[in-house]
Amino acid sequence: MENHIERRSDEHDSLIVAKDDNKSTEIVEALEKAMSTKLRSDSPLSAKCCIFRVPEVLRRHKPEAYQPDVVSIGPFHRGGKQFQLMEEVKQWYLQNLLSRLNLSLKTLIQGIDNVVEFEKHARRFYAQPLDHINQNEFIEMMMLDACFLIELFRKLCFPDFKLSVTGSVQETDTGNDPILNMDCMLQYFCHDLLLLENQIPWFVLECFCNLTAHNSPYPCLTILVLNFFSLETSLASNFKYYSEQNSRFKILHILDLIRTAIVVPTKVFWSSHITSESKLLPANILSEAGIEFRTRGAAESIMSIDFRDGTFMIPQLAIGELTEPLFRNLIAFEQCYHGRSHKITSYVLLMNYLISSSKDMDFLCDRGIMVNWLNSEVASQFFSKLYNDTVLKHFYYGRLCAEVNSLHPSGSHPTADHMHHFAILSSSVKLTY
């Protein structure tokens, strides 16, 4: 009897095991089927991606520095209610462009070399899926935004004239233009067009700039764009020495052009890792120790900082309303895009070493190195807030700082406040080795 019971128990256990095995097989097959459809053979982000949404870890420090105010360019902010007026203005600008050139919309579209590949290539610039925008909508958005920007830049380059079909200039009435009519619009547009999230590919701009040139006297696209931003005084000196011929970089978008114009004219960068020798005391303390500070006139770039014979030579920088969003978006671009080094980030770190209080800011203003359009206390914290939560792989002023420290009198030691300043710097920037 006991043997019979044991046999039945063994058979029951075997049935359970068999059922479990069958269930496991079903789960394995179901998982394989479900997961295999999600696997992909290509990277979700193309190496060409260079237009990003700003990572939340950076955005949270000042969200408004990364968001457009009046105009959406490209797909990331497309469709916002606050941009509806400018969408209507874009349509009006395109119609005026076609009428001025006696050009049909069909002819303009046909001017795009291989429109299918044009659309695919432009999509690869964006580091986010744009599946919600179909092919025709995407091409229309690129055309509308590019033609709008080119016309805007041309209008501001020649504010009192328009081109006829033959290329001669004629007077035009700009009284109905809501952009040119409002004095505040220039600053708003400068802000919006410098945002990392508010870009279209440079090759798209070039395409429509060439298609609508018609032997006009307008300068090339690069000069048009730089002339536009030079209309804003606080930005003008940042890239006035840029020459397109000196750049070995292929421009990716407007923000990349601005970065290139700031960085490229600088002659030599000596990169290094941050060590104790590459940290500087504030400008006021260095001055008391015998180090001189002078503004560097006619410098090729704001980044062309030099140190010779005990004297810091620093090009003048104007700090205004647009300076912070510009630097924040340049830093975000360097942090996100693998093809650009951390040179702007390095500049900000160096300036923050030199400015730890309003006393340092006032000192550099007195020397003509800083032009401050903010109050001293706010301006003294300007650089310290720019690079919170950033990564700095190479410090491009490391050797310069080491030279300063090698001449720094041994009798001058950092105070407790300055050591605290260094501690804050170390916690704000993640240094990689």
Image (spheres, rainbow, N blue to C red):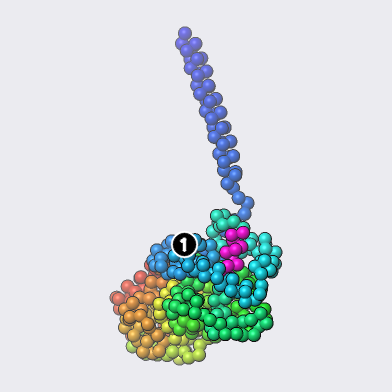
Above or below 34: residue 323:
below
Above or below 313: residue 109:
above
Above or below 183: residue 207:
above
Residue that label 1 marks:
80
Q: Is residue 222 visible?
A: yes
Name the image quarter holding residue 147. Answer: bottom right
Picture residue at 58% right of the left edge, 74% below the top = 96
Q: In the rendered view, does 76 fall on the left or right side of 410?
A: right
Asked if residue 156 is among those painted magenta in the image, a careful observer would answer no
Amino acid type, label 1: Gly
Foreground pick, 92 / 213: 92
Name the image quarter holding residue 295. Answer: bottom left
Asked if residue 146 is among those painted magenta in the image, a careful observer would answer yes
Magenta span? 136-148
Picture residue at 57% right of the left edge, 64% below the top = 141
Mark 1, secondary structure of its residue: loop
Picture residue at 41% right of the left edge, 87% below the top = 369
